[in-house]
Image (tube, rainbow, N blue to C red):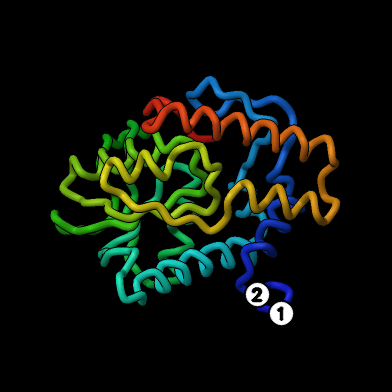
Amino acid sequence: MSKDQSLDNLWLARVLHDLGAVRFGDFTLGESTVNSPVYINPKVLIGNPTALRVAAKLMVQEVELAQSRRRSQVQRYDIVAGVPVGGLLLAMAYSMESVVPLIYPRMQVEGTGHPGVEGRFIPGMRALLIDDLITGGSSVIKTATFLKQHDIEVVDVVVLIDRQMGARSRLKHMGMHLTSILSLDVMMNLYHNEGLISDAEFDRYVAYAAANQRASADDSFPNPSSGDA
């Protein structure tokens, strides 16, 4: 890994932009009715193995740092699980980087397979749950609930990008702690400062973010139906 590919979350944000992961327009986020001027698709990382590996390394580094603190912010875990589908891609990369076993929550009927958990685990194990992007947190909550039904506990969640739309407080309410590598605010400020997006695009995002913050202030526990995208 060259110096240009160091463990730098801003480097990763630039690569995401270069790969076309960031689009501007008018988008509806998942199952929610929230219109956003920005759409993020972290799945494009699979087209750049180096960037995918950097993303996994950044996640491992952040988890290890949190665990090393006097008051550990990430609890011990036995296995890694990914939120289908984007989270599974990152969870696989994380598993290979950390050498922690991976499980796959198969939440839908697939071919001849029935819903269940693929991989080896012992009931009562604790899983570190990984996703590529979080908006309101519904996908994470659904996956954690599914794993709990199979006697697998989720306490900590790690995501690559947090859209900052109430997921952190919602997960905390559910007894889970969220760790993120990038936030949408950081990405948009970086892109604007480096001339990667126009003033008009940035201003539209700022207005959207401000409106969302006001909405979050009016609703201390956002609607669980708010989807991720």
Q: How many neighbours does mark 1 have within 10 angstroms: few (below 14), some (14-19), or many (20 or more)?
A: few
Q: Give the secondary structure at mark 2.
A: loop
Q: Point out the residue furthest to the top here.
A: 33
For residue 188, the mark is: none
- Residue 126 against residue 133 in the figure, above or below: below
The reply, left or right, for residue 89 in relation to residue 223 is right
**153 or 175, which lies in front?**
175
Task: Classify the position of the N terminus by image quarter.
Answer: bottom right
Label 2 near label 1: C-beta < 8 Å? yes
Q: Residues within 10 Å of mark 2 (few under 14, many from 20)?
A: some
- Which amino acid, by three-letter code, is at mark 1? Lys
The residue that appears at 46% across and 27% down in the rendered structure is 218
Residue 3: image tag = 1
Which residue is located at x 53 percent, y 58 percent?
181
Left or right? Give the position of 137 relative to 201.
left
The residue carrying mark 2 is 6
